[in-house]
Image (spheres, helix red, strand yellow):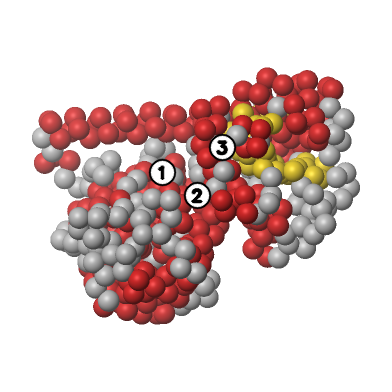
Amino acid sequence: MDDVFHEIIGRYKTDQESVYNTWFINNDERLKAFRSIRRGVQQVINDIRDKKFPNDFKGSSLEFVLSCIAEQKQVFVGVAHPFYWKPKLRIPDIYENERNKNAFGQFLENCFSYNTSEQELLTEIIKLDNLKIKGLGPAVASILYFLHPTIIPPFNTAIINGYNSLFKDNKKLGSWSEYLRLRETLIETNEKYKSSLSNDLGAIAGLLFEIGANKMVVGHEALLGEAERQKIEKQIEKRRKEVESEGQEEDLHTEMQYHLLKIGQSLGYDVISASNDRSRGYNGNNFSFMSLQRFPEMDLGKEVNATAQLIDIVWFRKGTNIPVCAFEVEKSTSIYSGILRLTDLSCSINNEQVNLFIVLPDKREKEVVMQLSRPSIKRNQTEIHYILFSDLRQHCDALCKFGENHGILKKISKSVLATS
């Protein structure tokens, strides 16, 4: 079995189109998502505690959390479906039932701490299961994964199908007790093969996803009929096109970061890219040569400082730690999570005015206007402008040539106030 499993892991890791390479290893957005999702979960907890959580999934802070998770490649496609409010079935029963809603909020709060131990997490899961809240099953594990990735594996139909295929089992989808047994096997297996996988259980969950989604066949290729083989080939081709599309989007994101670095330098500011982007470059221009070598020391607090270092581009007054402009480039990911990172920075700076910008594709203009019009954003009294990709690309050289300071960005940026 050891040789077989090593061979399976080897195929999984060497396939450049597997989720190991497209999601787990080579995806900066995955790392950014952990902070955004934690922030979102905290908002869910606060909304439930403050009696502000709505009686529907749509428009809730929980919807934002699941939207952020769903953006994490194919592994989490459909992660929000179990949480959609189904009025006829009254499930999941956490919207209209106050007792269940409070129990769900308290469960998330008890699981939220970085220091929550494995045994404490399992105890909380068992307590939640004992409440028998209708429709609230182990789909919640995909939220817990982003709080405790080394303890809780994500869970969905493809993952359980992959598990059953690999381990010749018959675990059921909607049962917490089945999930906990599956988890024990995964923990044991991951420990055995950890040197080839990761402490982060997303790696082994991704392997199960590949098998369960029929993107990786394990040990029974000869049993496949022609129709099934063609189906798998079509899925592989679809995956290839998705990977190509994602690569093109990533190139576009990098291009926009380059333009912002170039403009900031030309205007006389110290500039820096996100900490996990400094190895990138565009047209032979390495970000590491354009950026500061390290993020300036700022008294922001540990969590906010970690968030600030993941903002796509920040401009500082020359030779200081005073930020002048901060930019989030949102090509396809959640605009709201970018807004949260910017407002985190702005609200943590005393007596300094930092100009905040969302940079995004032209086709997402209506979406950014909607997000910036949220009452919760307006209440922060932090004005955020937005810049369209086409305008940044078209006017980059002119801004560099004729601009004297960050005020030149007014020529290409827009605000919700101006569009309303």
Q: Whole-Å distance between the Cαs marked 1 and 2?
A: 9 Å
Q: Are marks 1 and 2 in contact (CB under 8 Å)?
A: yes
Q: Is residue 98 shown above or below 22?
A: below
> Pointer 2: residues within 10 angstroms few (<14), some, or many (20+)?
some
Going by the picture, which residue comes out furthest to the front? 420
> Residue 339 location in percent, x, y?
60, 47
Q: Amino acid at mark 3?
A: Val
Q: How far apart are the alpha carbons under marks 1 and 3?
A: 25 Å
> Mark number for residue 326?
none
Q: Nearer the viewer, residue 264 or 244?
A: 264
Q: What is the three-letter code of the residue carrying label 1?
A: Lys
Name the spot of residue 274 as percent of width and height, x first: 66, 46
Residue at the image point whose x is 69% and y is 49% from the top: 382
Going from N to C along the chain, the mark reached first, 2 or 3, is: 2
Amino acid at circle 2: Arg
Q: Identify the mark nearer the N-term, 1 or 3.
A: 1
Residue pointed to by mark 1: 73
The image shows residue 93 at horizontal and vertical percentages of 28, 65
**Between 9 and 265, which is closer to the camera in this rendering?**
265
Quadrant position of the N terminus in the picture: bottom left
**Residue at which label 2 appears:** 30
Residue at coordinates 60% horizontally, 50% vertically from top-left? 377
Q: Quadrant of residue 48?
A: bottom left
Write down the residue under mark 3: 369
| Element on which disc 3 rests | helix
